[in-house]
Amino acid sequence: MSADGAALGARLRERDLGAAPAALNLIESTAPGDREQAAALLRELSPAVLGGEAPAHVIGVTGPPGAGKSTLLSALLHAWRARGRTVAMLAVDPSSRRSGGSLLGDRARIDFDPADSGVLIRSTAAGERLGGLARATRAAAGALAGAFDVVVIETVGVGQAETEVAEVADTVAVVVQPGGGDVLQFLKAGIMEIPDVLVVTKADLGQIALRTRRDLSAALRSLGSSATQVLAVSSLPPASGVDELVDALEAHRAELDVAERRLAARRSAALTDFTIEHGEQGLRAIGGRAAAQATLGAADPGLDLAALVAMLERSMS
Amino acid sequence: MSGDHSPRLPERDRPWMMRTYAGHSTAKASNELYRRNLEKGQTGLSVAFDLPTQTGYDPDDELARGEVGKVGVPISHRGDMAALMHGIPLDEMNTSMTINATAAWLLALYIVAAEEQGVAEEQLQGTTQNDIIKEFLARGTYAFPPAPSMRLIADMIAYTVEHVPKWNPINICSYHLQEAGATPVQEIAYAMSNAIAVLDATRERLGERGREVMEQVFGRISFFVNAGVRFVEEHAKLRAMSILWEELGRERYDVQDARHLRFRYGVQVNSLGLTEAQPENNVQRIVLEALAVTLGRDARARAIQLPAWNEALGLPRPWDQQWSLRIQQVLAYETDILEYPDIFEGSKVMEGLVSELLDGARAEMAVVAEHGGAVEAVSYMKGALVDSHRERIRRIESGEQVVVGQNRFGESEDSPLTADAEGGILVVDPKLEAEQVEAVRSWRAERDQSAVDEALAALAAAARDADGAENLMIPTIAAARAGATTGEWSMTLREVFGSYRAPTGVGDAAAVAPDGELSELRAEVSRLQEKLGRRPKILVGKPGLDGHSNGAEQIAVRARDSGMDVVYEGIRLTPAQIAASALQEGVHVIGLSILSGSHRELIPAVIDALRDAGVTAPVVVGGIIPEQDVAPLREAGVAAVYTPKDFDITRIMRDIVELVGAGAGESSVVVGSAANGSA
């Protein structure tokens, strides 16, 4: 028996955070009955019903393993809660290709008060989809954005992860540890998109952290991107740079045309989902990538992701 | 060789120091136990502290619930330490303390207790375990992040070399690495790498003075090792360690004096191999393991404590511990092992084994060095240990490695040893915890509060000073004298240093290729996934302060290998944390592991918290759970209980999958209409 999606969606819309776990269970489910209910849930939180974009600031945080993401997220969590923001974190972990199972270890490293009902942390496995966000993560982020003030999507990787996360986040922060040469090389070579914010962790390491920060700033300048801020953060006591990072993230969003970015993200995500579902062959059946983009571009901005994918599927026949 | 042709020593060797790892309930009760043990011929003390003391919490802290006086004695302040050592002359006694994160504090209390007896600190003899790296790797009773933990250790070494010269400030532990699954090569390599990290940190901390006293510092470092039942190879391991240690001293630290280059170690033999099934067989195992550390004179232990036969069942009673002491005494006083020079000298087999181990250990030490040393390599070493432990379990499951009475020769008569009402173990009176809570509160009420505040402020200031100008032992001893408590000392430092969670190692464990049984299980998990709509998701965690996470880690890794999504929460969780995680993660089943004996208090508390949060997912429990506690746990709502005799983890997984399958169709999370609302 499936939970009542529309009711859960309505509760989230009313910012009832207690509805979030059950809503996520539904959104993650592939059972046919659940899929229908999940669609109903998401409809309740679509721009059309909300009368605009969901109010949360959706932030993607990504970076290589060991860069210090969990520690950074702990520090951010405390800073946001100190400012009275409710926070949902979606931590995406890779799955084992061998067993299909996964070890979701991150939440153990994020320090939070279990009695604080203004915080939700949910780990999800990336699932069978290669290199990407969990199938349900975008939908989950979209739903939680109707209820929480801040929604964080944490992913692991460099080069691909920030592109995927950009399909849902308003602001993408890439986390680099001192001496982390990959990010610098990937930026210069154009393998990775330029993120909205770059964070150098472990600033307590001193010189090496400063040098990394300087190198990244220089690379950005040479790429002609002055908008991206590079910040150094130390999460160890005495913590430093965390408030500045919170300010920088907020400043990025304040500058942003949220409606436009979300709309572009939804359309791009719809095309990605459609291609995963139907392949290149399916894409040709609807007249190719450009035609699909045109169809999506003409769609009602109030439609949610599922509706956009459905629209593309209708044009297949 | 002594004498010209005599195969004997001119004079029989003195026996090693004999100890029993002991302590429980209260300082007073433990003091009585120590005095009785000394009367029985024990020659040194080995203090077991309870988990709140080891991790820096007072008995009235939320995290201490159910743990006070369980696996050791609670020591909250100098009054407790004085009671623990009452009537024991500290100028004569040699006391070993299994204490790590809070070692500086407990040594300070010991120094103050001696002061009160009129004994000066330079007369004190003994050992503080004080090895934090292995706490991150295997034992889990850490309190502060790595860097400040290393500073505390270096400060203790610097202080004791000068003021408590007969004290061994640190015992580098390979013991717990073996318990966590280390192979002999890993045990040697990681222990030596750990020692290098400590010595380097101390040399740096001592600065200019370092060059002068490094010789003495090196000479004060001792080891705490393990010995398994493969006792020939285990003996070779100890010979290999002495060779590496001497080499390290000469080459890296320029130590000249032969006395300082000697590899000194104490030992507790293997607990991992002790079985719950036919527990009387553990006596043979313990005897053979004791031979590993006594047979060859060139690598003989300085101090030995033997586990009791019933450790896999629960806490040993004084009688059980006496039996283990008597094993040592028979070895030392009845047999002839102390009459000969080294009996393996010239043995080709022994030389071959040693050289094999040396090659392996040197290669593995190089890998750790490439990671930047033991502190930086904690995550790498942890992952490697989880892998080795899994391999060990696989061999036992498949029958490749025989464990008598467990995976072979299981037929048994009923044992008269476990026939009494308690099942042959010690049961700590649960009322004691409330008494200790009262006691620490009245201690706080009766002391000079302003002196304590001042002392703690001075401690905080010394800790905060980025240059670390003051040795932290100085304000620590002052705080002990002023009457501060264990919880206050560590909370003061936690506020400055921050808290820390060690890597779990499970994320780095390699995914195994499935054998027949695991493939079947994966197919079952896939079918269940269809039914549930989501991949079956399990939460694995350890409530309470017990940091022995090997079992929980193996369950987590096997669940992943069975195809489940696993939320591994690690150690030291409150019931509220477990409930919040289970709710937020939408798990289908919850696995809890507990080895400290606090399951009777903690498991029902976790279940209450889960049900209050609206989580209806079933709970399974694993750990050292005495037979008579199983029924009460089931009544409290536990779906299944697993103990050390359930060594087949794949079978446990199959049970869990069935359990989830039986509940499928119902929603595992019930969200009440009384919403939490936004905060």
Image (cartoon, helix red, strand yellow):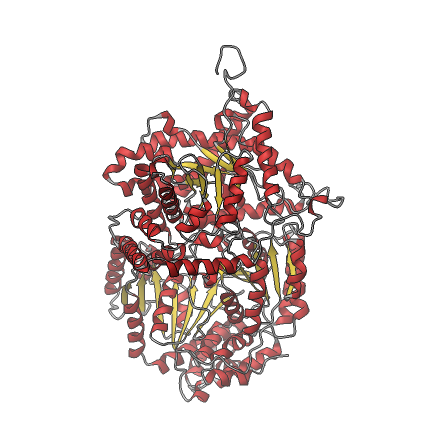
Q: Residue at 60%, 52% (x, y): give it.
A: B427
Q: Looking at this view, is B419 or A37 the one in front?
A: B419
Measured as percent of width and height from the top left, residue B505 is found at 48, 53
In the picture, measured across the screen, residue B142 lies left or right of residue B206, that is right
Q: Nearer the viewer, residue B439 or B492?
A: B439
Q: Name the one closer to the observer, B646 or B102.
A: B102
State the image coordinates of residue A297 (x, y, percent, origin top left). Answer: 41, 83
Q: Residue at x 53, y 82 (%)?
A: B674
Residue B575 drawn at (x, y percent): 52, 65
Residue B206, picture quadrant: top left
Q: Residue farthest to the top? A: B4
Q: Nearer the viewer, residue B251 or B168?
A: B168
Residue B340 in the image: state x and y as whole percent.
53, 20
Q: Is residue B59 visible?
A: no
In the depicted structure, whether residue B400 falls above or below residue A229:
above
Q: Is residue B486 above or below residue B634?
A: above
